[in-house]
Amino acid sequence: MSGMNLAPYREFAKGSLGFDFKNIELLVTALTHRSYVNEHRKSTSQHNERLEFLGDAVLELVTTRFLFDNYSEPEGILTSWRSALVRTESIGAAGKDLGYEPLIRMSRGEKRGSERARDHILANAFEALIGAIYLDQGYDVAAEFISKHILSKTEQILNDKSWRDPKSYLQEVAQQVEGKTPSYKVLREDGPDHDKVFEIGVFVSGKLQGKGSGSSKQAAQQEAAKDALEHYEKR
């Protein structure tokens, strides 16, 4: 990394993370996407996937221990809570809040990619960042980082019940209230093939109960299920 301007990375570490990296190259690698290495093979050989692998394990361990120590619910419930805390949307949002997106090194093509693709890169970089912090600063600092940016959202997730899978929960509610199983139908598709937005409706007993949009049919179905659940809660 000789000749590279490391000042923005040092400023990010000091300002947003609250400490100096002993090995700043770990932080740079954590924020380097594979596509960047493919475009700069002569100057760069390290991308963040190994750090992501490590960070994912640290994140799961810290989250699991936190839930085990603080809640007495059975294993199945705790697993659902953990999944909600560490899912791509949650850690991607934490990455956005940290503001490291401008520091992520990626290819020109990835920079022009869809919002969904960039969100995925942000989430992967968050896990890689955890891996880098763990290696550079140790377990306790990594655990404190996870607590501040992920575990602090626990009460919010429990209060708004976003830990429940909307489609599964809607199926339970619809069968209980209507005696019917929900079905999903694409209402509209917009945008080019590489960046489509789907609008999907969920129907119960042939009646439209909710609508949702997303960059994939699965994401749009989840949003439609959330919308329908709000409808049932108001009844």
Image (cartoon, grey):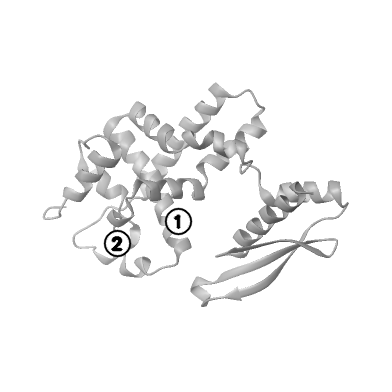
* Drawn side of residue 112 relative to residue 190, left or right: left
> Which residue is most to the left?
3
- Count every numbered label the image shows and give the total: 2
Q: Position of residue 6 (x, y in %)?
A: 17, 49
In this view of the protein, which residue sits in the foreground, 133 or 172?
A: 172
In this view of the protein, which residue sits in the foreground, 94 or 44?
A: 94
State the residue at coordinates (34%, 43%).
Answer: 129
Which numbered disc, 1 or 2, marks the residue that appears first in the sequence?
2
On screen, residue 224 above or below 113: above
Q: Which disc, if any, is residue 129?
A: none
Spatial CA distance of label 1 from label 2 is 15 Å
> Which residue is most to the right?
179
State the residue at coordinates (25%, 45%).
Answer: 12
Q: Position of residue 8 (x, y in %)?
A: 20, 50
Mark 1 vs mark 2, foreground winner is: 1
Q: Residues within 10 Å of mark 2 (few under 14, many from 20)?
A: many
* Drawn side of residue 176 relative to residue 165, left or right: right
State the residue at coordinates (30%, 54%).
Answer: 32
On screen, residue 53 above or below 109: above
Q: Position of residue 81 (x, y in %)?
A: 59, 37
Residue at numbered disc 1: 120
Identify the amino acid type marked 2: Tyr
Q: Which disc, if any, is residue 36?
A: 2
Q: Residues within 10 Å of mark 1 (few under 14, many from 20)?
A: some
State the residue at coordinates (50%, 50%).
Answer: 89
* Drawn side of residue 30 relative to residue 73, left or right: left
Q: Quadrant of residue 75?
A: top right
Assign a secondary structure to mark 2: helix
Assign a secondary structure to mark 1: helix
Identify the amino acid type marked 1: His
